[in-house]
Image (cartoon, rainbow, N blue to C red):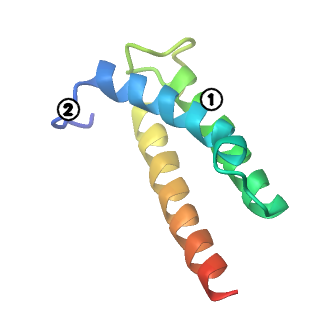
Amino acid sequence: MLREGPIPKVVHGVIEYLLGILFLAAPILFDFDSATATGVSITVGVLVLITTAVTADLPTSLVGQLALTAHVTVDFVLAIFLAGFLAIRRII
């Protein structure tokens, strides 16, 4: 079991829902000019919302089927993917 960090699980869950919504709205809010960036933003937003909604140990979960360790793994993989995507977009 992972220990709780400085942010309570309820706050973390709410932040993740807001972040997922922000990723979904970002192409409109920030007027993306790239179809790739739009697709990545929408995909990440959907993944964040799904993982938050199905994580078992979060009080904000809707279903409670995904282990917290899997949720954390998805968060880390998305962070690495987004950092790499940003780095590649800066190079091109």
Q: Residue 63: x and y, percent?
A: 57, 13
* Residue nearer the viewer, 70 or 41: 41
| Residue 18 % position (x, y) | 49, 29
Neighbours of disc 1 within 10 Å: few (<14), some (14-19), many (20+)? some
In the displayed structure, does residue 9 sit left or right of residue 91? left
Q: Which amino acid type is marked by label 2?
A: Glu
Q: In the drawing, what numbered circle is on residue 50?
A: 1
**Which circle marks residue 91 in the picture?**
none
Q: Where does residue 54 sit, x and y in percent of width and height?
A: 56, 22
Query: Residue at the location (62% across, 29% down)?
Result: 50
Placement of 66 over or under 83, stated as above or below:
above
Q: Secondary structure at mark 1?
A: helix
Mark 1 and mark 2: span between their CA atoms? 21 Å
Quadrant in the rendering for residue 46:
top right
Foreground residue among 19 and 57: 19
Nearest the viewer among 56 and 75 is: 75
Question: For mark 2, what is the residue?
Answer: 4
- Does 5 sit left or right of 25 as displayed? left
Amino acid at pointer 1? Ile
- Residue 78 drawn above or below residue 81: above
**Residue at the spot x=57%, y=64% of the render?**
81
> Where is residue 13 drawn, in percent x and y?
40, 25
Residue at the outermost right position: 35
Q: Residue at x 71, y 55 (%)?
A: 40
